[in-house]
């Protein structure tokens, strides 16, 4: 499970890397015209920027379905990504409100409200994982001559479509049960006062990867059971110091806590990866602080370091509990960022909102030191520390490394020479199970790591070699590691071709 989550985390880094740009576009547009996100804005430039950013943020599950399928596939082929998208579209179409209204022959109003929330990251993860599994297993399948056109990679979208139809049938029964259970749970904790607000904050973050947090949000933010925290706050109706309690505690986390976490992750990035990590973290911190868009930061460690994300959910609950206990309230129309915070100061029912800034300052310190300690203590794989993978390659040929040299594969450039040397030192495809490159390292899974000539690798001038156990070896190359990995793939491909000749 740990390996799967780490592989999932590295696969998600591709779509996550797009989010900071989208968040910055929306943040700048929102700063120009705060009414722009609601569609009531009048500034054309703001509307342009917000719509451009929204095109990415609102379609995040689609990006995930493609990115996960591509990242988990054995060779990063686009056919896997296309299959992931096919699977996602099938589920979300079959289980949409309009789709089910047609299938069941009932008015759309009678379709359970749970099916209005199926276009989420959880469904995207399922689709991407299924597509990658089918690609890795069946992409080399040869069909009879009459069906030969659909052999190999062309077969995967078909298989994925069939698998996702079956999964859709299962989700038809499972999804409403899970959704309704969360609504019932939300109704229960709404009667627990400040402690209930803390529980809500904890489970809100915990459920974000599944998309089911929307079910929980609807209980507290809207008029599902009479709380309507957002509507009542902005209408300034309700009880001062109480109305807004299911929103206020998010401000210290989004404006201060997550930027503190971003700083800690930057601090703990490997020296060669600090510039790359800084770009991701600065953009993510800006988006979180200014607009309350937290995906660029949260998804950067959500799956790669689930324990750290659990800690983040807990601290969110603590913030919600403290704010509700002391009756510090503020509200948001979009999310708990600076713009909404400033706008909420004008609402008469807001209660001691400046204290949320004090709590925010405390949360910044807490997040920074807690994240810093945990990352170092448990060697957590946060951005810049080795799990932000660009490609995973599985070598399947039973050939030797020596043939690569005698065949003249060694390149004249430094990346080719280094790749040839490393490939030979790890005993080539005879010993390699799989390898991929992260931000600075080549990560090998080997049949026997003890066979590796580590001194030969060090003689190539690499910064270091680290043998983790009997089957895993890391070769630290630096930020140019992708070029070395590309050269190694050429060597491996040439071995396969030579072996099949």
Image (tube, rainbow, N blue to C red):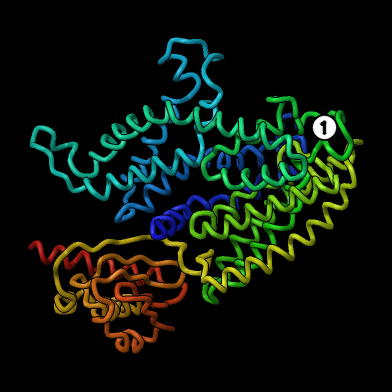
Percent across and percent down for residue 294 are: 64, 50
Residue 222 location, quadrant? top right
The one nearer the camera, 151 or 192, is 192
For this view, does 197 lie left or right of residue 483?
right
For this view, does 160 lie left or right of residue 278?
left
Residue under label 1, please give it: 234
Q: Secondary structure at mark 1?
A: helix
Image position of 243 with respect to 304: above or below: above
- Residue at (24, 81) in percent of width and height: 451
The one nearer the camera, 271 or 375, is 375
The one nearer the camera, 181 or 134, is 181
* Quadrant where the C terminus is found in the figure: bottom left
For this view, does 498 lie left or right of residue 206?
left
Please count the marks in the image: 1
The one nearer the camera, 440 or 257, is 257
Image position of 387 with respect to 461: above or below: above
- Residue at (41, 35) in percent of width and height: 88
- Residue at (33, 70) in percent of width and height: 444
Percent across and percent down for residue 499 are: 10, 65
* Quadrant where the N terminus is found in the figure: bottom left
């Amino acid at each position: 499970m740990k390996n799967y989550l780490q592989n999932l985390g590295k696969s998600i880094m591709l779509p996550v890397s797009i989010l900071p740009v989208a968040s910055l576009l929306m943040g700048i547009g929102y700063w120009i015209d705060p009414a722009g996100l609601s569609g009531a804005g009048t500034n054309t430039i703001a509307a342009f920027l917000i719509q451009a950013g929204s095109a990415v943020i609102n379609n995040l599950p689609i990006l995930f379905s493609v990115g996960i399928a591509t990242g988990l596939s054995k060779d990063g082929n686009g056919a896997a990504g296309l299959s992931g998208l096919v699977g996602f579209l099938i589920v979300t179409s079959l289980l949409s409100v309009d789709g089910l209204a047609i299938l069941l022959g009932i008015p759309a109003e009678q379709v359970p409200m749970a099916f209005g929330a199926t276009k989420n990251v959880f469904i995207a993860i399922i689709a991407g994982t299924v597509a990658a599994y089918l690609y890795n297993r069946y992409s080399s399948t040869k069909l009879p001559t009459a069906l030969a056109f659909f052999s190999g990679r062309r077969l995967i979208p078909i298989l994925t479509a069939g698998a996702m139809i079956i999964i859709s049938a299962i989700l038809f029964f499972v999804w409403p049960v899970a959704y309704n259970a969360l609504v019932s749970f939300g109704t229960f904790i709404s009667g627990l006062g400040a402690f209930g607000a803390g529980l809500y904050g904890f489970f809100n973050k915990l459920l974000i990867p599944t998309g089911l947090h929307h079910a929980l949000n609807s209980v507290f933010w809207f008029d599902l059971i009479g709380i309507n925290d957002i509507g009542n706050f902005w209408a300034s109706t309700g009880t001062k110091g109480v109305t807004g309690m299911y929103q206020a505690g998010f401000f210290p986390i989004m404006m201060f806590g997550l930027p503190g976490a971003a700083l800690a992750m930057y601090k703990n990035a490997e020296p060669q990866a600090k510039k790359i990590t800084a770009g991701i973290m600065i953009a993510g911190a800006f988006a979180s602080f200014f607009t309350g868009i937290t995906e660029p930061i949260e998804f950067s460690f959500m799956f790669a370091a689930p324990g750290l994300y659990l800690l983040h959910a807990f601290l969110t609950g603590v913030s919600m509990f403290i704010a509700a206990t002391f009756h510090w309230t503020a509200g948001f129309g979009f999310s708990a960022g600076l713009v909404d915070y400033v706008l909420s100061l004008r609402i008469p029912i807001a209660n001691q909102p400046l204290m949320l800034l004090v709590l925010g300052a405390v949360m910044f310190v807490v997040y920074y030191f807690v994240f810093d300690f945990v990352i170092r203590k448990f060697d957590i794989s946060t951005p810049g520390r080795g799990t932000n993978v660009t490609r995973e390659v599985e070598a399947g040929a039973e050939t030797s490394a020596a043939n690569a040299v005698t065949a003249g594969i060694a390149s004249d450039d430094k990346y080719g020479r280094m790749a040839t040397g490393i490939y030979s030192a790890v005993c080539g495809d005879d010993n390699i199970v799989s390898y991929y490159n992260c931000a600075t390292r080549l990560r090998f899974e080997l049949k026997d790591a003890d066979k590796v000539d580590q001194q030969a690798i060090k003689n190539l001038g690499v910064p270091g070699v680290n043998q983790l156990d009997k089957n895993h070896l890391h070769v630290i190359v630096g930020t140019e590691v992708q070029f070395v990995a590309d050269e190694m793939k050429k060597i491996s491909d040439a071995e396969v071709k030579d072996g099949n000749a």
